[in-house]
Image (tube, rainbow, N blue to C red):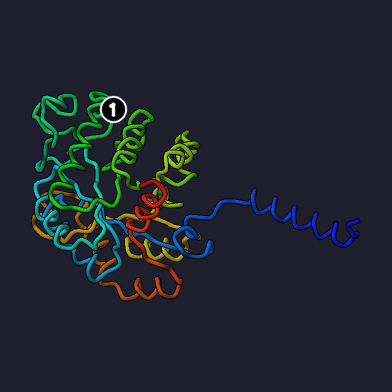
Amino acid sequence: MISLRAFVLCVAGLLAAGAESTGSAASLAERLGHKATDKLLIVNGDDVGMCHSANVATIAALEKGLMTSATIMVPCPWFLEIADYAKRNPARDFGIHLTHTSEWKHYRWGPVAPRDQVPRLLDVDGYLWSSVPQVYAAANPEQALIEARAQVKKALAAGVDVTHLDSHMGTLQLLPAFMDAYLQLAVEFNVPVRMASQETLERFNQPKLREKFAGKGIVFPDHFIYDELKDAKANVNAFWKRIVKNLKPGVTELYIHAALATDELKAISGSWKTRSEEAETFTNDAEMKQLIKDEGIHLIGYRPLRDLQRKAKP
């Protein structure tokens, strides 16, 4: 006959096993080999390839600064320069900044896909539309998908080891039908994506989007600095230091638009000052580098997320 003590120990063991089996899944940080309480930060450089000034600043931020990844605008005139750098530096993390708009007044670009396959993406002058609302009014998700796929394939053919995807001006991240195209690309190329924080998604009435992407095996950061950007422009340097100081545990992505304050950039964009200040903050600012150390923040790129995703879904 089993003793009372043995019975109690047996029951306790069963309860413990049940608790373990129903316990919460490992956090993304833990799956990446860190503690759940650790703060991991991806500093992504958007708009690389847009112009030479952006390429030079992005390369500097990757090589001697705090930038850990960057996303390339494949349709833009300076794509070839950054693609060549990416090919020669395969350890750098480069994703694709899926581009469906051409927003500058005097500096425009068209599609990568054959024009007869994406006619609804083009304005009367043959360029991509200037704004996201124009894309939504004239185009459809099918042609947006064709163009985005062509951009990824062109980058791969140029030797870019694509680590992740995001969407220029958010074209593929705002309407459900276009989000489906975003998801299809992530699955097709088996890469992680930029994803809005849960709080932002709930505000946009998309509370289940993270669950939908995760259900397809897509990996994405826990947090994304977006809603906070409304406070960014008064003092760029102080804003980003405040963001870094207040990171939550887990994986956070923030994005900047690094570019040098050249005549080229000033002729293209009215945001040239912010872009140059972001480049300086994340390349040469000793206080920012020290803050990262003092806060115990682990800088990572998107490659570990891609490796994790492909390990689970080869």
Instruction: Name the residue furthest front.
Output: 1
Residue that appears at 46% across and 35% down: 206
Residue under label 1, please give it. Answer: 141
Q: Nearer the viewer, residue 119 or 280?
A: 119
Spot occupied by residue 158 in the image (x, y as percentages of width and height): 12, 49
Q: Is residue 211 left or right of residue 136?
A: right
Q: Amino acid at mark 1?
A: Pro
Q: Nearer the viewer, residue 90 or 53?
A: 90
Under tag 1, what secondary structure?
helix
Spot occupied by residue 227 in the image (x, y as percentages of width and height): 42, 47
Using the image, determine if residue 177 lies above or below residue 53: above
Residue that appears at 41% across and 74% down: 293
Q: Is residue 191 left or right of residue 271?
A: right
| Quadrant in which the N terminus is drawn | bottom right
Q: Which picture quadrant has residue 281? A: bottom left
Residue that appears at 56% across and 51% down: 25
Spot occupied by residue 91 in the image (x, y as percentages of width and height): 24, 63
Q: Nearer the viewer, residue 274 or 4?
A: 4
Q: Nearer the viewer, residue 273 or 307?
A: 307
Q: Residues within 10 Å of mark 1 (few under 14, many from 20)?
A: some
Q: Is residue 46 left or right of residue 26?
A: left
Spot occupied by residue 193 in the image (x, y as percentages of width and height): 35, 46
Count of numbered badges drawn on the protein: 1
Residue that appears at 35% across and 37% down: 183
